Image (cartoon, coloured by chain):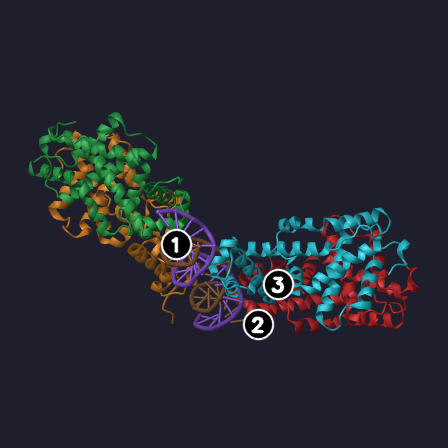
Chain colours: A green, B orange, C cyan, D red, E brown, F purple
Amino acid sequence: MTIHSQSDKKQAILSAMLKLITENGFHATPMSLVATEAGVAAGTIYHYFANKDQLISELYSHLKQKMGIALLQDENLSLAYPYRFSLFWKNLFTFFIENPVEFKFLEQYSNSPFISTETRDDNQVFYKPVIDFLADGIAEGHLRPLPLEFLVESLFGHVVTAAKFHLAGTQEITGDLLDSVVKSSWDSVRTEEFSGYF
Amino acid sequence: MTIHSQSDKKQAILSAMLKLITENGFHATPMSLVATEAGVAAGTIYHYFANKDQLISELYSHLKQKMGIALLQDENLSLAYPYRFSLFWKNLFTFFIENPVEFKFLEQYSNSPFISTETRDDNQVFYKPVIDFLADGIAEGHLRPLPLEFLVESLFGHVVTAAKFHLAGTQEITGDLLDSVVKSSWDSVRTEEFSGYF
Amino acid sequence: MTIHSQSDKKQAILSAMLKLITENGFHATPMSLVATEAGVAAGTIYHYFANKDQLISELYSHLKQKMGIALLQDENLSLAYPYRFSLFWKNLFTFFIENPVEFKFLEQYSNSPFISTETRDDNQVFYKPVIDFLADGIAEGHLRPLPLEFLVESLFGHVVTAAKFHLAGTQEITGDLLDSVVKSSWDSVRTEEFSGYF
Amino acid sequence: MTIHSQSDKKQAILSAMLKLITENGFHATPMSLVATEAGVAAGTIYHYFANKDQLISELYSHLKQKMGIALLQDENLSLAYPYRFSLFWKNLFTFFIENPVEFKFLEQYSNSPFISTETRDDNQVFYKPVIDFLADGIAEGHLRPLPLEFLVESLFGHVVTAAKFHLAGTQEITGDLLDSVVKSSWDSVRTEEFSGYF
DNA sequence: AATGAATGAGAGTTCATTCAT
DNA sequence: TATGAATGAACTCTCATTCAT
């Protein structure tokens, strides 16, 4: 009679690493501690992951995918462009503030040397629908003709900044304030045509 | 005839750490390597810095100050609000793209556990003039009444995103594109009154 | 087929430390040398002991206990007081000269800053029967009414001095000389009543 | 205008080492700390002492000599043997309790590997008069015919034990108690002839 | 004589990883 | 599959000692 099923253990290891690395950082999170927190033996980790970097990398991929799914939730192609924009924006924002630990991990490690460029690129697939949505927005004159990749990073940055501010705890971003913030983001990319929205 | 003056050595250590930590990350930058790169003995580092954390912390403070000075360059109180906005924006952007290593370090460590909250707070003084400028902007109706701290982080994020894109090398942000990007940032915070600028 | 059982390794580490520290002293006994002498890897020491101080402390406790057991050997409550005194005295003396390395360690570290007051106190339990024996001796008029703790230290000192002299090798303390030495010690604490013994 | 004269500095270094090594032990007393405590530069120590071991050794010799002088104070050859015995005993005891730091140092280092056998032997000269006194005591039938060196160590041990007990602070050894303790020591070495003294 | 910055070997300790069970 | 004792390279940091000034 074991406490963990096989995939339970893998999940427990990932969760333990997520929790510990977010709290203490990479170099203050020894594998032995991950093992203890996950309730498995140190050696067991190496049945599921080749090494520490692989574990981090897999955790990153896992969370990136989770984020991609959240981003696309309730996508509705029949909505007007600004409303679709708003939906994606709020989807991402909601994912961040409802998953603060995951958010903090992604914030800290997306640009760190622990995640290889290859790993980063592999996980872009989950965002393709939104990138296409933005490309269409430029093509159809809803969005300014800024370089697409810049546009993506810029908008992503807006949501991140808002989520960090919200989670800092001084002032919640909800209701009217949330709408103002989305409008602020939208105003930075929309063309003249859409000045009336929101 | 010595090769180093006293402050030369301290500076050499800071530079070596900046270079190595940006390339390899904190935990892949042993003090022995810093010593070699700086051309000093391992023990010498400990004459100037109490420990590795202190060294990182002092490096952070040093660069934050340098960034603060660059931000305020050519400040001109007689200019119209949007032009002052544009000056600060471009000052910061220029500092980032002209000091890519410093930029990468600040990007990577500003929010990391290696920098204590105290160290972070201590270094906010250098930015006070710009924060006041933004607070005035809201008070005088040039900027939207968003929470001041959010506004600060949001605008800072715009410059960071632009600098990262520029440095990625695919497409330079200069000339008209730079103006478009500044306008995008400005449009996200300005009130209706200023729709005509840029 | 392994060379060491689990407790073998712990014991090997304790023995190695005992040998080396007695020969060279604390600060000339690096952990790496202890590891080599014990036939284990450096890291292995830290499975059994939290740090060097802990290792010394545990060694001390171990030997104090061993000494306590030797001291009480063949205790015989039906013997006359002076003969019980003589038994304890010779028990301790024999333990010292038969375990010269252990003796030297205890000599060198019992009063050193390496052993915490707490550790020292914790190990007094092994000597309680003898301390009671001495307290009874005063109460019953066999021993002079000197402060108990002084009496204990004084007699302990006699045995230590004799053992050191014996081990120095110039002249063995056995036979008649041993009896003279025990008598000397006894004469320093006995009351008039017992002037005839030995 | 200097603060220290030449020999002042040497003395300051010896005093600083004595204080620090007694408080913290050898391996917790770095030369840099000795320099600070003595109010001199680290390098200056090496003008007066070849190295750390030499410094310890010289400190040891210095204190042994001081102890020898104290031991022989008020020596009076015309006194009866037991009174001369008592004088030496109390001289040594007084030196110990009036110089507790020096006493602690001598206690801790006399038997440590830091003091070479050579250094130890060199300093025996200061005690020659007392050793002769004891040898005479045996020859003349005042003292038991125990090995001379054993007698010396034994009596020395008595004084040390008493001084340690006194300095521990629980109970002072003065007045009648001091007399009892000297008598205890005397009784352990005197022949029958002297049973009436004290 | 005196300084103290600089040295660099070596200390204690950690921890990713292995492997016999 | 799971264990966890064992490994040993590599880490941060200390400190006795030197030497240019």
Quadrant housing the C terminus of chain A: top left
Q: Which residue is mark 3?
A: D12
Q: Which residue is mark 2?
A: D50
Is A161 drawn above or below residue C186 in the view shown? above
User: What is the tally of numbered marks visible in this picture?
Assistant: 3
Instruction: State the SS at label 1.
Output: helix
Residue C5 location, x and y as percent?
A: 51, 57
Q: Are marks 3 and 2 on the same chain?
A: yes
Q: Chain of mark 1?
A: B
Instruction: State the SS at label 2.
Output: loop
Outermost residue on the top side: it is A175
Q: Nearer the viewer, residue C181 or B42?
A: C181
Residue D74 location, x and y as percent?
A: 83, 65
Q: Which residue is mark 1?
A: B55
> At label 3, which amino acid type do we have?
Ala
Q: Chain of mark 3?
A: D
Disc 3, disc 2: CB below 8 Å?
no
Q: Residues within 10 Å of mark 2 (few under 14, many from 20)?
A: few
Q: Are marks 1 and 3 on the same chain?
A: no
Mark 3 or mark 2: which comes first in sequence? 3
Q: Nearer the viewer, residue B145 or A19?
A: A19
Residue A37 location, x and y as percent?
A: 41, 43
Disc nearest the viewer among 1 and 3? 1
